[in-house]
C-alpha cells in the first residue's frame, strides 16, 4: 500500500547564482525555505518532514519549524564536485526505514498541490514513481538552429499538431526509497507524469527567476 509518505527537502547554504537563495527574504519576511516547510506542514499528509543539509543554521531552523534535520556530509553540499547519484543516494540513506519519499524543492515556491499529486500517484497502479512536469507543444530548435520536432517550410505544422513533450520541473518527485536507491535517481521507467501549470512550474535558479517568482507569489 502506498500509504507511508515522507517529505524530503534538500537545502544548501552556498548558492552562487543567488546569494543565500533559500534563506533570504522572499515574501512577507518568509524565505523560500519557510514557504516550502509551511506548505508541507499544512497538508497533514506526510508522516515525517525531513530536511537534508550540512548547515548548523538549518539545523536550528528545523528545531523552530519542528521538522527533522538530517545531517549531510559537507562534501555532498559542494558545487559539482561529486556525481549527482552519489549525493542522491547519500541523502536517501539518511532516511530511516523504506517509506515513499517525496522530494520537495524550495526552488518551486508556487507549487503546493502535494495532496493532489500523492492521490494521483496512489491511483496510478502501473506507475513506479511520480514526476511533476510541464506539458508543452512548442517548436524546438537545436544549438545550430536545426528543427528538433518539426519540419520547416511547406511541411511546417500547426502547434496543435505537434507531439506533446513534458519538461521536468523541480516541484515534486515521488517513489519508494528502496526503488530510488536502486535507480540512483528520482524516478523510474514508468513514472506518472503529474501535469503542472506554467505558474506552478516556475523554478528559482537565477536572480531574475527569484524576482519573477516573487511577483507571481504576491498575486
Image: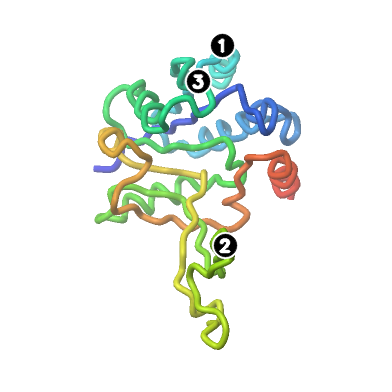
Q: Where is residue 155 shown, x and y percent of the image? A: 51, 85
Q: Residues within 10 Å of mark 2 (few under 14, many from 20)?
A: few
CA gap between label 3 and label 1 equals 8 Å
The x and y percentages for residue 67 are 49, 22
Secondary structure type for disc 2: loop
Of the pair 218 and 185, the residue shown nearer to us: 185
- Reading the chain from its start, which is encountered first: label 1 or label 2? 1
Is 18 situated above or below 65? Answer: below
Q: Earlier in the sequence, mark 2 or mark 3?
A: 3
Q: Which mark is residue 212?
A: none
Residue identifier under label 1: 56
* Of 50 and 145, the residue lying toward us: 145
Front residue of 213/145: it is 145
Q: Quadrant of the N terminus?
A: top left
Which residue lies at the image location 48% right of the left edge and 25% below the top edge? 81
Along the horizontal axis of the image, is 132 left or right of 203? left
Quadrant location of residue 181?
top left
Q: Quadrant of residue 178?
A: top left
Q: Dot 2 corresponds to which residue?
A: 144
The structure residue drawn at horizontal position 54% and vertical position 68%, both measured from the top left corner, is 146
Please, what secondary structure does the residue beneath circle 1 have? helix
Separation of disc 1 and disc 2 at Cα?
Answer: 46 Å
Tag shown at residue 53: 3
Real-space CA distance between mark 2 and mark 3, rounded to the nearest whole angstrom? 40 Å
Do tag 2 and tag 3 residues touch (Cβ < 8 Å)? no
Q: Is residue 39 left or right of residue 3?
A: right
Helix, strand or loop at mark 3: strand
Q: Which residue is rendered at x = 38% and y = 50% of the image?
A: 119
**95, 78: nearer the viewer:** 78
Amino acid at each position: 500500500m502506498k500509504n507511508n509518505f515522507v517529505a524530503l527537502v534538500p537545502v544548501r547554504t552556498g548558492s552562487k547564482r543567488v546569494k543565500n537563495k533559500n534563506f533570504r527574504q522572499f515574501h512577507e519576511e518568509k524565505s523560500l525555505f519557510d514557504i516550502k516547510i509551511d506548505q508541507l506542514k499544512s497538508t497533514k499528509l506526510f508522516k515525517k518532514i525531513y530536511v537534508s543539509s550540512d548547515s548548523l543554521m538549518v539545523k536550528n531552523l528545523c528545531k523552530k519549524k519542528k521538522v527533522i534535520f538530517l545531517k549531510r556530509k559537507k562534501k555532498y553540499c559542494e558545487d559539482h564536485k561529486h556525481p549527482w547519484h552519489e549525493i542522491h543516494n547519500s541523502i536517501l540513506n539518511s532516511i530511516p526505514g523504506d517509506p515513499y519519499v517525496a522530494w520537495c524543492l524550495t526552488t518551486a515556491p508556487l507549487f503546493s498541490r502535494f495532496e493532489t499529486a500523492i492521490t494521483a500517484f496512489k491511483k496510478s497502479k502501473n506507475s513506479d514513481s511520480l514526476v511533476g512536469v510541464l506539458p508543452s507543444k512548442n517548436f524546438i530548435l537545436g544549438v545550430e538552429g536545426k528543427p528538433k520536432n518539426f519540419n520547416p517550410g511547406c511541411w511546417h505544422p500547426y502547434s496543435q499538431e505537434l507531439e506533446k513533450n513534458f519538461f521536468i520541473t523541480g516541484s515534486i518527485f515521488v517513489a519508494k526509497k528502496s526503488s530510488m536507491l536502486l535507480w540512483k535517481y528520482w524516478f523510474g521507467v514508468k513514472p506518472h507524469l503529474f501535469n503542472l501549470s506554467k505558474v506552478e512550474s516556475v523554478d528559482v535558479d537565477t536572480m531574475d527567476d527569484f524576482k519573477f517568482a516573487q511577483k507571481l507569489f504576491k498575486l
